[in-house]
Image: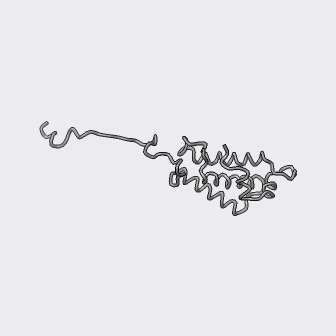
Amino acid sequence: MAYCTRTDIVKQTDEETLVGLTDDFDTGVADEGVIAQAISDADAEIEVYCGERYRDSLPFSPVPAIIAKLSVDITIFNLYDRKLGAPEHIEKRHANAIKLLTNISKGTVTLGANTPDESTSDDEIQTSSSDRIFTRTTLENY
């Protein structure tokens, strides 16, 4: 399941731009295969960042709104980057997306309901101990 759709992408850019970024054979129509590949690449990148922290939730379903937004931003960057190089505002959105993904992977930003339960993390060490058997007082007689 993709984290964003073609419709999501068109909302952030326009159809003419999408045709220009994907129509490698001058057909006058956006190449759906190129769009699908750009979405797939963006989603794979998102999962690389979220993989360790959210491994039991991948692929995300339902898709958190912020993940869908990041997928759109990275997909649009990928489409520009394959042909023209991205304009400054697209590069900035991509850089912000990567920064947010980095913070998600570090745990400084969470995805809300999909956040792993910190108390049941496999990485956590839990110990318990009983009362002390030996103290200075009990050792004085030996």
| Snapshot colouring | one colour
- Which of the pair 109/45 is nearer the observer? 109
* Residue at image coords 70%, 49%: 5
The picture quadrant where one finds residue 33 is top right
* Residue at image coords 59%, 50%: 64
Left or right, 40 with reference to 32: left
Taking the view exactly as shown, the residue that stands out farthest to the top is 142
Give the x, y percent position of residue 66.
Answer: 60, 54
Give the x, y percent position of residue 63.
Answer: 61, 48
Q: Which corner quadrant holds the N terminus?
A: top right
* Residue at image coords 54%, 54%: 103
- Which of the pair 15/140 is nearer the observer? 15
Left or right, 46 with reference to 110: right
Left or right, 30 with reference to 134: right
* Residue at image coords 70%, 63%: 88
User: How many numbered markers are drawn?
Assistant: 0
Give the x, y percent position of residue 23.
Answer: 83, 51
Image: 24 above or below 90: above
Q: Which corner quadrant holds the C terminus?
A: top left
Give the x, y percent position of residue 22.
Answer: 80, 51
